Image (cartoon, rainbow, N blue to C red):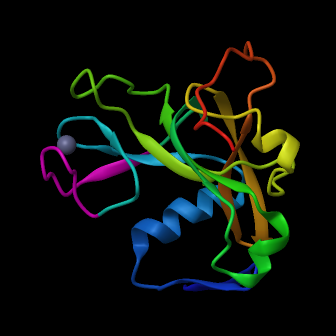
Amino acid sequence: MSITANYLGMPLDISGLDTENLEYFRHCAAHEFHLQACAGCGLIRYPPTTACPWCAHPQSRWIAVEGKGTVHSYTEVHHAIQPAFKAHTPYLILLVDLDTQKGKPTAEEAVRVVGNLTTPDGALAPPEMVRKVGIGTRVRMVFSDVVPGLAIPQWTIDEAAAPGTPWRYPQE
Ligand SMILES: [Zn+2]
């Protein structure tokens, strides 16, 4: 069964043939984060794919993964390319190193998951929240509900973590 929805003016379509993404988003709709673990080498991967990026084994199983991590890098968007995003600028696109499997299979690697910075209830973060976040910020996963059966995994500041001093691009 395919998924068709609209998020802030953008069509979101997942084909009925895309079994990996349908399974991934089925878990997200229940506000659960699951990734594929390789049946060969055991490593988890993101985004969902048909074969392991490290050993090419075609089999995998879905496992629950903790949605916690550290901002590896970010983009701060000031000029929205979609009209409905204009009201939310500036907004952040975060690339987050999951705590799970960090440093594997080599010391420099991590499972890095993309998402926007949002409030704990999944709305795009306001400017005062955007200014607090940079490389090194501890974040936790939350979900933005789009339609029944579809939610988008996002990131919000982990309130339980020490704020630290995240690195941000110099501001004008
Ligand atoms: Zn593998």
Which residue shows up at 21% across the image and 51% down it? 53
Examine the rendered structure and indicate whether residue 94 appears above or below residue 3: above
Q: The N terminus appears in which quarter of the rendering? A: bottom right
Q: Which percent across, then down, holds residue 162?
A: 73, 12
Seen as rendered, the residue at the extreme front is 172
Q: Which percent across, then down, holds residue 98?
A: 49, 32
Residue 134 counted in the magenta span: no
State the predominant SS element of the stretch in magenta.
loop
Q: Which percent across, then down, holds residue 74?
A: 55, 45
Which residue shows up at 81% across the image and 50% down it? 125
Answer with left or right where residue 168 lies relative to residue 150: left
Q: The C terminus appears in which quarter of the rendering? A: top right
Tell me which segment is drawn in magenta: 50-62
Q: Which percent across, then down, holds residue 58?
A: 19, 58
In this view, the residue in front, 39 or 34, is 34
Which residue shows up at 39% across the image and 59% down it? 48
Examine the rendered structure and indicate whether residue 108 appears above or below residue 125: above
Find residue 81 and report its image quarter: bottom right
Which residue shows up at 47% across the image and 85% down it? 16
Q: Quadrant of ligand 1?
A: top left
In this view, the residue in front, 167 or 1, is 167
Regarding residue 116, the answer to whether it shows in the image is: yes
